Amino acid sequence: MLRIRNVLLCGLILVPPFGMAMASEETASAVFGGGCFWCVEEAFDKVEGVVSTTSGYSGGHVENPSYEQVVDGGTGHVEVVRVEYDPAAVDYATLLHVFWRNVDPFAVDRQFCDEGESYRSVIYTASEEERELAEATRDELSERFDREIVTEISDFEAFYPAEGYHQDYYRKNPVRYNFYKSACGREERLEEVWGDEAGGLGSR
């Protein structure tokens, strides 16, 4: 099913790599891996208080990897999204709430139709406080579902922005994006796991 995304990328005009936006003094950032970064961008862009989202790669040992290197495997990297947000408008706990309800927390080395280490779900924490919050929510979900949550919680080390054509893909290429998302079965699986909570934008 990974072919779906590769086919959708054919024929696109490539633009220069999208630079990593640094958080300002008024904003903070969080990094999440939830499968296809196109879909994760869309999920977090809907959250009030989120300033911007940037698709990229984290968690591996190769500096400035390409998309092809990451999806081929062996780099240790995960497709991630860097979420820049206004802490006065939305807190990290809310971002975690949205993250969980946009992933399949039981899937090992995959999310929906995309398979491989680069599609595993991960929360990259940048402080002890973030780690404690992430672990607490994971443990709550494990108790709720009475099964193991396989989503990783790892220390954040580095973020490498993805190529420019990946940024805001769902906005720039809505027809291709919606075809991919539908064919991948993402929404159906989220509803199967989370029911009315799927997407995470409802009441907490």
Image (cartoon, rainbow, N blue to C red):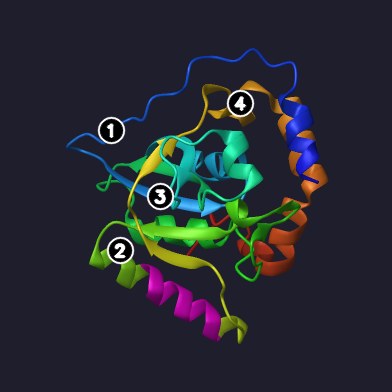
Please indicate, yes or no, whether residue 48 appears anywhere in the rendered image.
no
**Secondary structure category for the residue under label 4:** helix
Is residue 150 depicted above or below 40 in this figure?
below
| Discs 3, 2 touching: Cβ within 8 Å | no
Estimate how packed mark 4 is, as few (under 14), some (14 to 19) or many (20 or more) residues with alpha carbons within 10 Å.
few
Name the image quarter holding residue 116: bottom right
| Contact (Cβ within 8 Å) of mark 4 with mark 1 | no
- The answer to whether 80 appears left or right of 35 in the picture is left
Residue 48 in percent (x, y) is at 42, 43
For the point 50% across and 46% down, which residue is it? 80
Q: CA distance from mark 2 to mark 1?
A: 19 Å
Q: Amino acid at mark 2?
A: Glu
What stretch of residues is rendered in magenta? 134-143
Find numbered disc 2 in the image and state the secondary structure of the residue it sits on: helix
Identify the secondary structure beneath mark 3: strand
Q: Which mark is residue 31?
A: 3
- Label 4, on which residue? 171
Q: Amino acid at mark 3?
A: Val
Seen from the viewer's position, the closer of residues 41 and 202 is 41
Residue at 47% from the left image edge and 62% from the top image edge = 97
Q: Which residue is mark 1?
A: 22
Q: Position of residue 195 (x, y in %)?
A: 69, 66
Instruction: Categorize mark 1 by other alpha carbons within 10 Å: few (<14), some (14-19), many (20+).
Output: few
Q: Nearer the viewer, residue 112 or 144?
A: 112
Disc 3 to disc 2, C-alpha distance: 11 Å
User: Which element is circle 1 on?
Assistant: loop
Apparent side of residue 96 relative to residue 11 in the rendered image (left or right) = left
Q: Is residue 166 left or right of residue 191?
A: left
* Percent of width and height locating residue 115: 71, 54
Q: Which residue is mark 2?
A: 130
